[in-house]
Each structure stands twice: as structure tokens, then as C-alpha cells.
Image (spheres, rainbow, N blue to C red):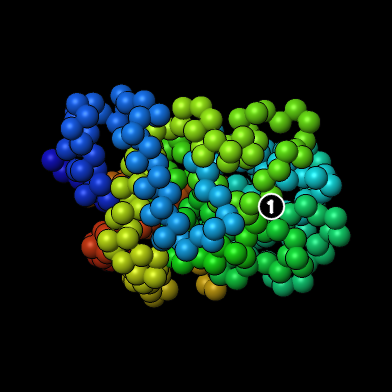
Amino acid sequence: MARVYNFSAGPAVIPESVLKEAAEEMLDYKGSGMSVMEMSHRSKWFDDIIKEAEKDLRELMNIPDNYKVLFLQGGASLQFAAIPMNLMKNKVADYIVTGQWAKKAFAEAKIYGQANKIATSEDKVFSYIPDCSDLPISEDADYVYICENNTIYGTKFHELPNTKGKPLVADVSSCFLSEPVDVEKYGVIYAGVQKNAGPAGLQIVIIREDLITDDVLPGTPTMMKYKTQADADSLYNTPPCYDIYICGKIFKWVKEMGGLEAMKAHNEKKANILYDYLDQSEMFSGTVVKKDRSLMNVPFVTGDADLDAKFVKEATAAGFVNLKGHRTVGGMRASLYNAMPIEGVEKLVEFMKKFEAENK
Ligand SMILES: *Cc1c(COP(=O)(O)O)cnc(C)c1O
């Protein structure tokens, strides 16, 4: 068996120990004689799985009691609609557009009310985070929206925007569990788990209780009402059981790694290995303003599309896979999520040095 170093932006690398454990439990989960895939979501076994997953997540992120944790389906993309449907009481929301995912969320919100683009970095291909210390927040805005880590462009809000008292809603899909967060600074934090915490198909929505109400936009599907899901402890209908099970194992793995402080140190160490090399390389360079760099997604280019293609091809052959950049940025992108080991980045940089020397 040969495992590759997988730099995919998502679905992405999962800790090997988690995959092994799941494999061992595949045919007979804890003496049930069944796989977790085969059991009722109302069974005692699954009840333990989902409760334990929530407990571990609450512990990891230090989630206050007045926040609910929801395990939902539909992709992070369905939240682009669920958020305005549930939160737009005044039908007004302010969006900070720092990449494709924020742009999509903004376009979706416009279907439901007045969505205002109050800041953007589109003028420079989303290569920076705009100054958000004093934005023209609308007086009647129901919330202010950000995508905290821009998966495609490799930027991250290292400082949250000043929302002037309005609830902050953040898509943290690609930085979920990568560093400590102060949950109280947000109204809603949500993530598709397939970037940093599990298999595709599960969204985790962490939402302040006062934002969960029956006062939603007319026509909101029952299943998309946060109230429905919160009242039913995410078991209104069959949840993505197997995803929740794998996520639960990943939460335990993060705890074993030392929690979010330790995860941050681990991620900084990895990202710095690559950024330090990019900063001194004569062939490769990063595409993002230094102070806004993401620890998770690192886009880089040679400046020559043919050379980029040659690099991706040779890297793939050497076992460094999914390095091709997003089509809107070109070049390469290395995603360095929690489960990417340090040696994966060290070996990638060694490979890049060799490539640079051979292709001068
Ligand atoms: C991948 C991604 C999405 C989309 O996730 P889906 O689950 O495919 O809908 C949304 N936001 C961010 C930041 C992402 O990285």
C-alpha cells in the first residue's frame, strides 16, 4: 500500500489513524454486528456517537452553552441560502467579498433580500483582505458575512471585521479546527467538514441561540429552518450518520494532538516551511499579500504556465498529488490541512528545490 502526500483543497487528507480505526470497525461496530452505515440513527450506538462528537467539539472550540451545534446536510453551499432565509428579519445583510465562496454566498443572499457588498478585494484577484476596521455597516443589517479563510486564493482574516454590533456570520470551511477561535465573537460559524475535518456531506453550524427563531422568510423549507434542526438535536430526519462518526474520530484525533493551540503551532510550522522557501526561491512565488496569508491553502506560481504544468506533472509522479491551482489563479496550490504531516511539507519543499535547480 502506497499512500500519497495529498495536497487537495477538498475533499482532503484525513488522519491515517482515523481511517485505520474506521476500517477496523467497518464490519462490527462495538459488538453491534453492524457497520455504523447500517444502523438506525435512533439506536443507542448512534446516539452515543453524535452526543460524543458534539461534546468533543464543544470542548475543543470552547463553545459557550448559549450556542447550538447543528450537524446538517447540503454542503456549505446550502448554507448560502439557509443563512439569509433564517436571519434576514429586516431583509438586509452586509457582505465582505474576498473570494469565490463569499461571492457565491453574496449572490445567493440577493435572492432573498437586500445584500450589500460593503468591501471586496476583487480588484486584485482576491489576493488580500481589505481593511475592515470601519466599514459602512448598514443600520438595519441583520448580519455581516465573511468567508474567513479563502480556500481558492489562500487569504485569511487574521483580524475579524468590526461589525459595529451586528452578528458576524462566518464560513470557516477551510480553517475549521485549524487554530483556536473565540466563538463569542460570532453569531454563526459554519463549515463544510470535507476540508479539514471529515468526509464530504456534513456541515457543522454553530449558532447563538437567540438567532434561532420561528421568524424565518416565508417559503423556508422545514429542513432548512435552524429551529427545526435545533429542536430535534440534528435528528429531525436521518442525518449523515457515517460522516458524523468519522468527524467524531477526527475531533478525538485533534484532542490527542493537543487541541487547537497545538494544532495552530503544528500548522504554523508547516506553512512557514513552504512560505520561507517561496520567499527565497527564484522560480516560485506566493500570490498573496504576506500579512493575509492562510495557514491552510498556499497558492504559488512560477510565472510560466508551461513550467507550472511540468512541475505539477513531475510532482504527481513523485507522490505529491492535487497540487494544480484553481483555474482562476493558475499555477499551484498546496493545501496544508491539519492532517498533512510536517514531513509531507518538508519533502515537498525538497522536491521543489530539486525542480528549481534542474529547470533554471
Ligand atoms: C469548499 C468550500 C465551500 C463549498 O462547500 P460545499 O460543501 O461543496 O458546498 C464553501 N466555502 C468554502 C470556504 C469552501 O472552502
**Residue beneath the point at 38% across and 47% down:** 53
Look at the image and tell me in which quarter the C terminus lies. Answer: bottom left
Residue 122 spot, x, y in % from top left: 68, 56
Q: Is residue 3 left or right of residue 184?
A: left
Seen in the picture, residue 136 relative to 89 is either above or below; the reply is below
Q: Is residue 43 left or right of residue 101?
A: left
Residue lying furthest left: 1
Q: Is mark 1 within 8 Å of ligand 1?
A: no
Residue placed most toward the observer, 41 or 271: 41
Residue placed most toward the observer, 260 or 239: 239
**Residue beneath the point at 60% across and 64% down:** 184
Instruction: Label 1, secondary structure: give it.
Output: helix
Residue 351 spot, x, y in % from top left: 25, 60
Seen in the picture, residue 335 relative to 185 is either above or below; the reply is above
Residue placed most toward the observer, 119 or 290: 119
Seen in the picture, residue 151 relative to 257 is either above or below; the reply is above
Camera sees residue 308: no
Residue 180 spot, x, y in % from top left: 46, 67
Residue placed most toward the observer, 52 or 86: 52
**Residue beneath the point at 77% across and 58% down:** 118
To which residue does mark 1 refer? 210
Within 10 Å of disc 1 (Cα), the crowding (few <14, some 14-19, many 20+) is few
Amino acid identity at mark 1: Asp
Camera sees residue 217: yes
